[in-house]
Amino acid sequence: MEQYTTPVSLLQHQAQLEGSEDGQSVATNTRGALRAEILAALQGSRVALEGKIETVAVEVNLLQADIRKVSNKVKVAEGSIVELQTEVGALHKQMVQATSTVGRLEAEDAISGYGCIALGMERLKRAFFKTTTISL
């Protein structure tokens, strides 16, 4: 924190008042000098404060820019996640379709296989009965 010192001390002003014939003018001058110093100090404080406020404002703007950058990155990441989820969903759908197709093909193969076995058994029975004579 900045400190402002008075170049002319109050003791010197007091000595001037005590040693002078015209104490009133010295007092007026002293008050004027002190007022000028106080105003200068206040003005310096105001300038310093404004500088700090500007610095803080710049830092806030930079922070907001960083937040926007991070927010954009998050949005991009979220978009990527959504895209990935969509791709995974599409792949899952394809897998379900493929599984369904394989299941249907297996079922069809099984049915045709059983059909072939049944047809073969029927042919065997016919052939057996045709060639076999039962004698009583």
Image (cartoon, grey):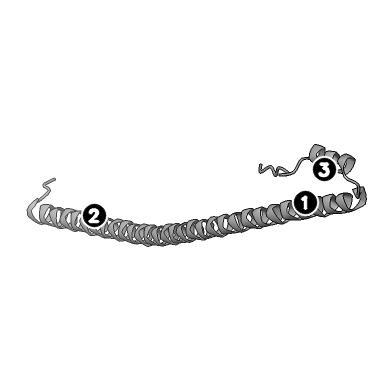
Q: Secondary structure at mark 1?
A: helix
* Disc on the earlier residue, 3 or 2: 3
- Indicate the amino acid at tag 1: Ile
- Indicate the amino acid at tag 3: His
Along the line of sight, the residue nearer the viewer: 54 or 124? 54
Query: Which residue lies under the disc numbered 1?
Result: 38
Name the spot of residue 109 as percent of width and height, x first: 23, 57
Query: Which residue lies under the disc numbered 2?
Result: 114
Quadrant (top left, top right, bottom left, bottom right) of the N terminus: top right
Crowd band around label 3 with a 10 angstrom C-alpha radius: few (<14), some (14–19), many (20+)? some
* Disc on the earlier residue, 3 or 1: 3
Marks 2 and 1, how far apart at CA: 110 Å
Name the spot of residue 38 as percent of width and height, x first: 77, 51
Give residue 13's mark. Answer: 3
Along the line of sight, the residue nearer the viewer: 97 or 111? 97
- Indicate the amino acid at tag 2: Tyr
In this rendering, position of residue 45 left or right of residue 110: right
